[in-house]
Image (cartoon, grey):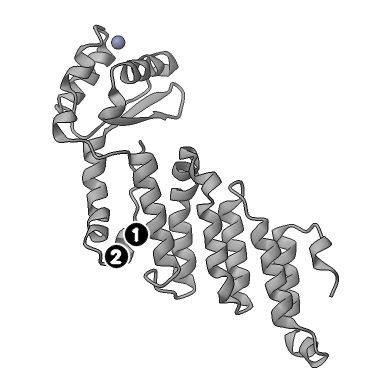
Amino acid sequence: MPKVQTLQWSLGSWQEFATHITNQRAALEAFSFPFTNAIAEILGIMIRQISSQNIQTGVITVLEVCYSTGTLALVPDTLRKMLDPASLVNVAYIEQTLIPFVPTLKQFIVTHKVPPTFAPYAGIFKSILMQWISMVLGPRPRDIDVPVTIMQNTKCGCSECRDMVNFFKQDGGEAHSFNRIGATKRKHLETKLQTYGGRNAARWSTIVGSPQGLQVCLRVALWQTADLFVEPLDNKTCSISSKATMEVPSSTGC
Ligand SMILES: [Zn+2]
């Protein structure tokens, strides 16, 4: 076996190499080849190649090698790469990388017939959920925090601001989409939301397209959704039920 540490291979190449020597395992071991050590070494290299930039494909590729080679002892190290403290300070990483990865990881363990309540998956899903709550959802608002007055203070009479006021009065439900208003109006609304404390009451995101739009969700509504997931934790059942864990509310659009 070459000095593998010196090889600058991609994850895909390492996976092929691991598959190759696994297929040849019996023949190699007949010549005293240290199969188990070699695979562990390869997996160690692969795990170090996982970063926030390739977390989705990287984790799945390495997990595939863990399972195909029977090296399940390195599954926890692989999953821990998702929760690298340096990445977790980045809200965009949690929102745009980590949360969207949950269904993919769920599909992986379903394929491998692993119950999602099994360690280390249950702990990872729980940690992702808690990161989402603390970093993205923010503190739980009190009902009286829904600032009906916020948008009324904008002193702007344009139709979008009037719609926004009505939305905060909850005439418009828990979420409101300002469709196809264009970038200028979108920025206008975002400025008003930022200036008058909208972050305390809502989250918003651009509706991509031409012209652009803006979707606004009340945080109270988001927390009502989150409660479905958080309560099992508060009850110390551990284990947040697998179903809840898998369905982190990532599709709010906000
Ligand atoms: Zn306005």
Quick one: SS at disc 2?
loop
Q: Residue at x 25, y 29 (%)?
A: 201
Q: Which residue in the structure is indicated by mark 2? A: 241
Q: Which residue is mark 1?
A: 245
Residue beneath the point at 59% across and 56% down: 57
Report x, y in % for residue 103.
43, 57
Q: Nearer the viewer, residue 130 or 115?
A: 130
The quadrant of the image that shows the C terminus is: top left
Amino acid type at circle 1 is Thr
Contact flag, marks 2 and 1 (Cβ < 8 Å) = yes
Q: Quadrant of residue 244?
A: bottom left
Q: Is residue 176 above or below residue 94?
A: above
Picture quarter with ligand 1: top left
Q: Position of residue 181 (x, y in %)?
A: 37, 18
Which sits in the foreground, 252 or 139? 139
- The reply, left or right, for residue 207 in relation to residue 11 is left
